[in-house]
Image (cartoon, helix red, strand yellow):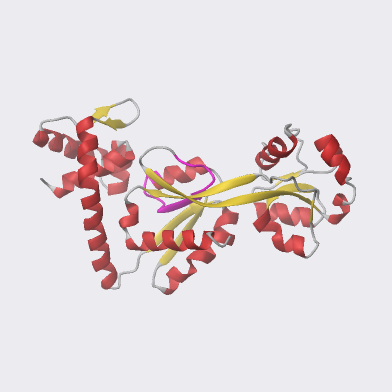
Amino acid sequence: MDLALLRTFVAVHRAGSFTRAAALLGLSQPAVTSQIRTLERQLGRPLFHRRSRGVTPTAVGDELAHKAAPHLDALLRITEAEREAAGAQRTLHLAGPPEFLSLRVLPALAPLVGQGHALRTALRTDAAEALDGLASGHHDLVTTTVRPRGGLFTATALCDEEHLLVAAPYWAALVDPDRLREAGPATLDGIPLVEVHESMPLATRYWAAVFESRPDTRPDAATVVVPDLRAVLECVRAGAGLAVLPRYLCREALDRGEVVALPEPPVPPLRTWFLVVRTGSLALSHLARAHELLVGAAARW
């Protein structure tokens, strides 16, 4: 059986789409369709059900993928090992939110540069956009707080991110901790809010988890809206108001007293970060090494 046909078949099986598989393989969609039809003729059985949105494998298709994919991945690892032995440089394409990439991911991957690899980043605040780019082969690895579904992706939980409600000392001094615990967010009325988006995603999540309510999400509810958490922190530090921020981002400002955490709940709101790759792509040595570095670093975050 032609290995090229099997490779295309496994790509379609994992991608769930001829179009996505074509992008990953660097082929045209008609070429992928032709190869799958050729393989189906050779086997005498259909491998996929054609749907309006992509394809789903038949029982025969699932069985073939289960048997063939591990061997194809092993062959890829052999090829990668030979490429690495020849000293070929590999480029790792990353995507994710700018703050997490800048402060967590890129420092953890710095050793790759010393090993002769190159890094390219795409700053993506929208998880769906980042995962679409991963599916189409534009990215190799995505960090996101959205756990993807389906067989195309493999997601590994990296770490839990703890969220705090913080403000500059001036604003924090106006908040009575006991009243905040008893009366809830009404205590914060009159204090400006800084957020990353008009929809106020961080405040909404925090209010639901801690106060069991929703903040005012009218378009003018947030006084300052800036799509970068580092800029949010700088605004809070400068006295623009209060904000919900991850602890890792504002730890140094807290230690220096530049911002103050308002009374923390017994169980702080958490958000889980995932490291996402295309299924089977960890057969690539440079990607497997990046994955290992990030998982190891996350244990210390």
Residue 42 in the image, given as x and y percentages of width and height = 9, 36
Identify the residue at horizontal 84%, vertical 41% (top origin).
180
Query: The C terminus appears in which quarter of the rendering?
Result: bottom right
Coordinates of residue 142 in the picture (x, y in percent): 46, 51
The reply, left or right, for residue 48 in relation to residue 280 is left
- Classify residue 254 as left or right of residue 118: right
Q: Is residue 294 left or right of residue 115?
A: right
Q: Residue at x 48, y 65 (%)?
A: 109
Q: Nearer the viewer, residue 24 or 278?
A: 278
Judged from this view, the residue extending furthest toward the front is 266
Q: Position of residue 295 (x, y in %)?
A: 47, 59
82 relative position to 268: left or right: left
Q: Is residue 243 above or below residue 189?
A: below
Tell me if I can see residue 237 in this picture.
Answer: yes
Circle count = 0
- Viewer-side residue, 30 vs 40: 40
User: Magenta span: helix, strand or loop, mainly?
Assistant: loop
Q: Is residue 80 magenta?
A: no
The residue at the far top in this view is 52
Image vertical order of residue 295 relative to residue 274, above or below: below
Query: Magenta residues, as a range?
Result: 135-148
Q: Is residue 188 visible from the viewing direction of this image?
A: no
Q: Residue at x 81, y 62 (%)?
A: 257
Which of the 4 image quarters holds residue 198? Answer: top right
Residue 44: percent from left, percent from top: 10, 31
Residue 146 magenta-highlighted:
yes
Q: Quadrant of the N terminus?
A: top left
